[in-house]
Amino acid sequence: MSAQNFELRSKFRGLTDHAVTGLAILATIIVVAPLVTIFAYLIYKGASSLNLDFFIKGPKPVGEVGGGMANAIVGSGLVLGVSSLIGVPIGIAAGIFLAEFGRGTKLANAVRFTADVLNGVPSIVMGLSIYALIVLPQGHFSALAGGVALGIMMIPTVCRTTEEMLLMVPNAVREAALGIGVPNWRSVLSITVKTASPGIITGCMLAFARVAGETAPLLFTALGNGFWSTNLNEPISALPLQIYVYALSPYDDWHRLAWAGALVLIILIVLAVSLVRYVTSRGVLKGAS
Amino acid sequence: MTRIRFQQSLEELKENLLVMAGLAEQAIQRAVEAYRTRDLSICELVMRNELAINRMERDIDQAALDLLAMEQPMAVDLRFILSVIKINADLERIGDSAKSIADRVRYMEQMPAVELPVDVPRMASMAIDMIRKSLQAFIEGDAEVARHVLTLDDAVDALNRASYKALTGVMEEQGQAAPQALNVLMICRSLERVADHATNIAEDVIFWVQGADVRHYKSVKAAESEQDAGASDQKE
Amino acid sequence: MGVGIEVQNLNAWYGANHTLQDISLHIPANQATALIGPSGCGKSTFVRCINRMHETNPIGRVTGTVRIGDIDIYQDAKPVEIRRRVGMVFQRPNPFPTMSIYDNVAAGLKLNGYSNRRSLDEIVEKSLRNSALWDEVKDELKKKSGASLSGGQQQRLCIARALAVDPEVLLMDEPASALDPVSTSKIEDLIFQLKAQYTMVIVTHNMQQAARVAERTGFFLNGRLVEFDLTHKIFTNPTDKRTEDYITGRFG
């Protein structure tokens, strides 16, 4: 081909390159924009209501100005704690079974199918089911019921991510462990799972972040509580619940609190996720190039 | 079949060796012809072709070395290249023997012709026959023909010993024919050497084809039976 | 000290594929035995039958006898026990990615409950010395991860890891095929030294390597053992024409 032809083609390729790069940048902006917008709006609406009281005081009676959502923050923490205790171990165990011990078996297929279905259950249906299974027999709403509902919702995400991450561990590592006479179960726990742990932890965090903001399941289980409570057997407040109640109320003061609450909820989730990342990145071996 | 280029290189090596063999065989024949006809010009020819033989020896050795280094030959290919290197050396020596004979003929030219009781052409034809057969064995990779060549050496050795006896007799009785007799003695010795080289070539062919080392068969056998005899003596 | 391996009528399957047919041979103690053959001939499968790794594949099946020393490994012992007596080094170096060099070497012991600190230190040093890696890593044993070493070093780390559990047999499946020539030479020198203490079986594609390191060589073809003899005989004057065709490169 002639020299001019070649030059033209290169110029065309250069232009295409720039155009596609531009499109990619545009796409990124479009994806990030909503998050940034929401965050910015929340800050605009809620930052002014953030003061120390917000974090250490419970709500004041209607009509009185001030007060905070301390009880809701603590309540969320308790409920999420219970749900993690339920969702993480069961989810990881199921993931390990699917990836390491039950590969190809009918049981594994059934488990996977169940997890996928569970994942698709609407959160309100989950709330209603736990209402029927725990609240009614117990005769009262409780934080425990809320934790169970959220915990069950965590299981599919944790399970599937754990399985995926374990499957990504190269077979060479398993063979190496078997080759030095390590029993299979030991190899799975001490080597395969350990190798996949960054990914597994990410899966847990994803599940945590998802259920941290769930409101509907808590409506029928934890119910919410205007007063201070740390008793698992009593109804308990939670940030999303409280935001819901305050947002629908006719009081301006409560509206302000709702905005602040929403901002705090997002910040807490981001903090929790970052903290887990930080702690675990120091645990995984440094110096790997 | 894989390694086509390598197989072709082996074929080429074989062909070059055969060309060299042709030169060596031709040299002996010419030398003997010069003896028969006392033609000095043929001697000249033999001297000149000696150069070609020496050059070919170096070329063939170099080609073999390259193949060993570059192609990592194994088993039969390895044995083949090794036997080519050895046969190469034997052929060059045959060329040297031819030159020796031609030299003798030149010296004898200056002496009066004498009737000697030795049939050099007959001895020569036996030696040349051995060369031909060993080369035939090489061309066809035939160990049987090669083994046959090994058996022909004894006859040549016998002839050589007989010539030695006859010629020393001449030197004792006819003093003035001594120089001629001596030269003819040396020619016979060269021919006996040629037969030995042909034997070596046959042994190398057997090594290549069968992987069996049959060299120095008689002396090895003799040493072994001596050892066995010694051992059984000790036992008693 | 190494022990001899006696194999009789070994057959192996992958599902319906009859991968190894009637293999019988004796591998002498404290020597290196090389196994050569074209791709798919079964030599890797054979080696995996010796440390009972073949059966970790769900469709893998084995019949026949393999005796290591005087123990029938399929009748008289459990797979895990056998794999502690028979070490394996794989084609691609596979150090444990989350562990330091020290932990990698000690893995076989630590994961089996061994916890005596002082002995572990000694064993790790001895194993690293025996695999010619000690001098290169002795200052960074616990700081550097196994995966941060070069390819040749990683392979020697895997050898150290295998040696740490004190096996009697060491199986190597193409140990140097992923390495550069200098690393390959180091591994070969290592094999020479290790022969004194262990019985070595080396699967290799590289015939010159087999010729350099092994006293005996076995030629596998299509799941059968075609010829098994002293290395120098196999490479100068093999008995079977198929062996000769393979090693001269007439087919590959």
Image (cartoon, coloured by chain):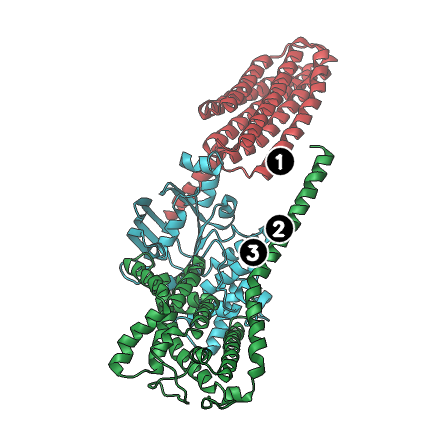
Secondary structure beneath dot 2 equals: helix
Q: CA distance from mark 1 to mark 2?
A: 56 Å
For residue B55, above or below residue A189: above
Secondary structure beneath dot 1 equals: helix
Q: Residue B128 placed where, x, y %?
A: 56, 17
- What amino acid type should be assigned to the residue bearing mark 3? Lys
Among the chains, which one is red? B
Extreme residue toward the right, this view = B110
Q: Quadrant of residue B190?
A: top right
Residue pointed to by mark 3: C186
Among the chains, which one is cyan? C
Q: Quadrant of the C terminus of chain A?
A: bottom right
- For residue A220, say whether it is visible: yes
- Residue drawn at the location 67% of the way across and 8% of the way down: B37
Q: Residue A21 placed where, x, y %?
A: 63, 53
- What amino acid type should be assigned to the residue bearing mark 1? Asp
Q: Quadrant of residue B173?
A: top right
Residue pointed to by mark 1: B66
